[in-house]
Image (tube, rainbow, N blue to C red):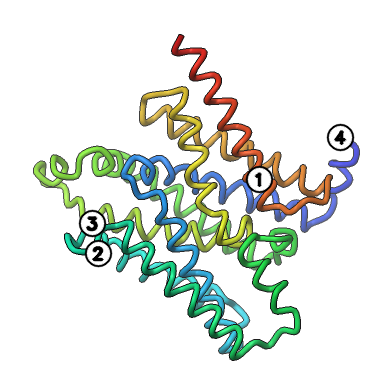
Amino acid sequence: MIEKIAMYLEYPFVRYALIVGVLIALCSSLLGVSLVLKRFSFIGDGLSHVAFGAMAIAAVVNLTDEMLIVLPITVVSAVLLLRTGQNTKIKGDAAIAMISVVAVSLKKQLVNLFSTSSNLSGDVCSTLFGSTSILTLTSYEVRISVILSIAVVVIFVLFYNKIFAVTFDENFTTATGTPSDRYNLLIAVVTAVVIVLAMNLVGSLLISALVIFPALSAMRIFNSFLKVTVFSAILSVVCALLGILISILGGTPVGSTIVAVDVAAFLICWVIGKVASR
């Protein structure tokens, strides 16, 4: 098996998939802890549907680089989602549901009206579940993913204390003079970037798994924000590596394989947590 893996690593597309997969898993896990604690886990699901709809717009206008449309639309939606979610009349979960439904219906209509592909169902499934798109990355897409991923990690490290503060007590953070709205906005924008990057890895329907499972797994064992964040990042990277390698060796879909590994890791951590508590 080791020889077979070494043989596959000689191919550039495999190395690209591993690099991008690890970086996306790392970024998703860092943000996942804050999003889970803020009861905003499904923002990933809502924004992934927005990105799903934005891809249809890019296809309609025959734009070669989808990122030029998908990323700005997703970021703007993240800002609107945050603002709407703070409205007393429209709560966060309702806002996410509204944006998700509108985006998916828009995608469906645009694809049916202006489809330029003969394999419509295949294109949709690839976008929804990731398919093998992570194995067809170009060097340009890898460079963009690396740059954006590094930016996300740097932002998280630089503003770690502020993110920690707004995660646990926004009112107290605001009372101490820290503009919590500004840092909530930062979290939303960075999350939008991660969601766009993760579309190629697991597809729009499975993105929430990358955000939720590593954080929940870490919380089964640790009760410190820093320890949960570090363990979540390590676990997410390991699961992404294992998922991609298993997918390549076994010929299984990349996205669903990574999610299956994440679920297995969660069950193991849950058992460890139960045993430790006794």
- Horizontal side of 96 relative to 26 (left or right) equals left
Cα–Cα gap, marks 2 and 3: 11 Å
Residue position marked by numbered label 3 in the rendering: 182
Residue position marked by numbered label 1 in the rendering: 258
Instruction: Assess disc 3: are there few (<14), some (14-19) or many (≥20) residues with their C-alpha within 10 Å of its C-alpha.
Output: few
Q: Can you tell which of label 2 and label 3 is closer to the viewer?
A: 2
- Quarter of the rendering containing residue 202: bottom right
**For marks 2 and 3 on the same chain, the one whose residue lies earlier in the sequence:** 2
Residue position marked by numbered label 2 in the rendering: 83
Kind of residue sitting beneath label 1: Ile
Cα–Cα gap, marks 2 and 1: 32 Å
Residue extending furthest toward the top: 278
**For marks 3 and 4 on the same chain, the one whose residue lies earlier in the sequence:** 4
**For marks 4 and 1 on the same chain, the one whose residue lies earlier in the sequence:** 4
- Horizontal side of 84 relative to 154 (left or right) equals left
* x then y, percent, for residue 150: 50, 52
Q: Can you tell which of label 1 and label 3 is closer to the viewer?
A: 1
Residue position marked by numbered label 4 in the rendering: 2
The quarter of the rendered structure image containing the N terminus is top right
Cα–Cα gap, marks 1 and 3: 33 Å
